[in-house]
Amino acid sequence: MARIERRYPVEPALLETLRTARGDIVLEEPAGDDRWTMVKGPFSEYTRRLTISERDGTVTETTEFTLAIPLWWVYLIVLFRRALADLDRRPRKRFWWPREVVDAETSRLMGAVGTIGAMAGYMGVLIGQTITFAAEDFGVSDSGQANTLAATRIGVLLSMVLLGRADRIGRRPLTLGFAIAAVVFTSLGALAPNMAALGATQTLSRGLTTGLLTLVTLAATEEAPASARAIAVGFATLATGFGAALVVWIIPVADVIDGGWRIAYAVPVLFAPLLLWLSRQLPETRRYTVASRHETAGDINWRRFALIAFAAFAGAVYLSPASQLRNEFLRDDLGFAAIDVSMFQILVSIPATMAVPLGGYLADRFGRKVVGATALGFGVVASALSYQSSGPQLWILSTIAMSSSAAAVPALRGYQTELFPTRARGRVGGMIDAITVTGSAIGLVVVGQLAVRWDDLGSAIGVMVFGPLLVVLLVLTLFPETADQELEIFNPGDIPLAEGLATSPVAAPGEDLPATEPIRGRPTSS
């Protein structure tokens, strides 16, 4: 349990502030004798008390708390300590926390999905980060690598079919099931005797991790308060990036040990005990709980779907080959060794870790459209130019590209959740994933063929930059603004969360809800 102790002089105005129940980070209620306990807040334990010393004329405020955020509390506790020690206790939005009071259940969910997102991030980038080393062992060309990467995208068909189940059985069971299966199939890659076998195991793994990342984003946006959905997506993105970065730390083993890239595929076995523990920490989202207890509609607005799907496809045509073939460009075109590739990826990624929460904060404050379009535009232009660069210019452009692209994710990623009703979000997520992966596969195949024909990977990738630039135009002109608005505004067939929770209990992790008669939801508007 963390403890904050602050001493102040006894002054009437200050004493009045200290004796006022908090309503910012935590919602307090008096417990007598200058003591307050928690009504609602992101803590599993919380107390605050005042002790007045007449001898030296001081008042000591002591706050004790335990964050209800599994694992990630290590990084957040410093921010919470500063916020709880602040005498300015007006409800306000911080760059890392919403203005609304968040309860312990939501905090647990965010921490759990963040951890699962980190696992998915590791497994999701594994084939792209290691294929250049596997190809060297197996004697496969650049075109063969691109084709293998494209083929692994077929696995998304599995997740597309299964993600629809999230609208019927819930986010929690599907998230845990996807995570366990992804660990199994990813680990089998360590035993692959050839590129075909590696591609086969990672086809299933990639499909599962793609679906897992969709479920993580879905849960984060469904559960987060309206004022901080982009911040929540930013946290999930940051956690995913943390997992992906672990692969980069392991890559140098490929130069030290023959077949050392296989070690990276064995690492997910270590995730199994953590998943067992997380299964007891992960609750169901409140919006799904409400939707499952009411007969709410799950109709898809196909105009919105077409807009989001086209943007996802057009963006993936460039973004996938630009990220997946980066290591090949560094090794073949610029002569980087494995340790050089690893250090490059780590160093250019460091600013991106700060850009993600900043992008989320700016998107919640100034709007998804302007922040998302601006960040994406800068990111893809810098990325395309980096493939025509070397030396210091390469490092600068790659850093700008990665940071700008990272800042765009919290602003744009949530659209596929925000614009569709609760009972359709799993289906929509699966279909959007399939369309995104189709664009990704097409981009990889085209780039692979052009790279062989032109003998220039950088130029082949640069040709595809028209895709995300078109997305920038679509976001600015056709996308709606969703910042700081409840999801039910865009989906009037859903029951408002506060109203639904008043008639629907929320189950704890692993607990079944009591059987009751369903309540018919509101009709959808056209």
Image (cartoon, helix red, strand yellow):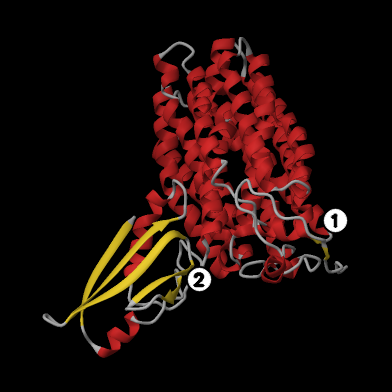
Q: Is residue 116 above or below residue 335?
A: below
Residue placed most toward the observer, 57 or 229:
57
Residue holding disc 1: 302
Asked whether the viewer can see residue 105, the reply is yes
| Position in image of residue 515 (x %, y %) | 77, 55
* Image mark count: 2
Q: Is residue 388 above or below residue 39?
A: above
Element marked by disc 1: helix
For the N terminus, the quadrant is bottom left
Element marked by disc 2: loop
Residue sitting at 45 percent across and 33 percent down?
246
Mark 1 is surrounded, within 10 Å at the Cα level, by few (under 14), some (14 to 19) or many (20 or more) other residues, namely: few
| Position in image of residue 14 (x %, y %) | 28, 84
What amino acid is at disc 2? Arg
Q: Is residue 22 above or below residue 493?
A: below
What amino acid is at disc 1? Trp
Residue placed most toward the observer, 65 or 398:
65
| Position in image of residue 488 (x %, y %) | 73, 67
Q: Is residue 11 above or below residue 484?
A: below
| Real-space Cα separation, disc 1 to disc 2, in angstroms | 33 Å
**In-image side of 214 versus 424 (left or right):** left
Residue holding disc 2: 99
- Using the rendered view, name the quadrant where residue 135 is placed: top right
**Residue projecting furthest to the bottom:** 12
| Position in image of residue 355 (x %, y %) | 47, 53
Q: Nearer the viewer, mark 1 or mark 2?
A: 2
- Using the rendered view, name the quadrant where residue 38 is placed: bottom left
